[in-house]
Amino acid sequence: MNATPHNAEQPNSKYPHVYAVVRFDLDVDRSSIEQSATVVKILPSRVLAEQEASRLSKINRGKRCVYTVQTTRFIGTF
């Protein structure tokens, strides 16, 4: 198999990148693990998304959840 490495930060020619702030709840039973992730916000830049994830992490410290940023694509119109 001849696989090309994928770079999530490389812009897509058809769809602009946006950045999802995702919360992972750590107290979820493994039988319903798909319910542990929640997209909290979508932001237009990685910097803004990382700042928001950091802010939410500080506000919710001690609540058994983790905030992270995931690159994704915007498909549609505003």
Image (cartoon, grey):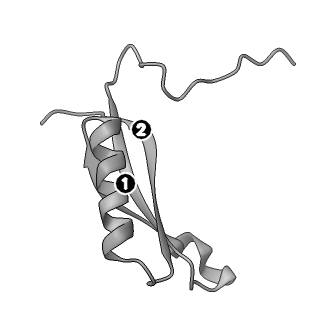
Where disc 1 sits, the SS reads: strand
Q: Quadrant of the N terminus?
A: top right
Which residue is depicted at the point 72% across and 16% down?
4
Q: Find residue 38 and report its horizontal and vertical position in percent.
A: 41, 66
Q: Position of residue 17 (x, y in %)?
A: 35, 30
Where disc 2 sits, the SS reads strand
Label 2: few (<14), some or many (≥20) within 10 Å? some
What is the tally of numbered marks visible in this picture? 2
Residue in view at x 24 percent, y 36 percent = 44
**Circle number at residue 42:** none
Q: Which mark is residue 21?
A: 1
Which residue shows up at 51% across the image and 75% down it? 35
Q: Which residue is more in the foreground, 11 or 62?
A: 62
The amino acid at mark 2 is: Thr
Badge 2 or badge 1: first in the primary sequence: 1
* Distance between the alpha carbons at the discs numbered 2 and 1: 10 Å
Identified by mark 1, the residue type is: Val
Q: Which quadrant of the view contains residue 34?
A: bottom right
Q: Is residue 56 left or right of residue 22?
A: left
- Residue at the disc numbered 2: 72
Looking at the picture, how far across and down is residue 16, in whole percent? 31, 25
Local crowd at mark 1 within 10 Å, few (<14), some, or many (≥20)?
A: many
Above or below for 22 versus 26: above
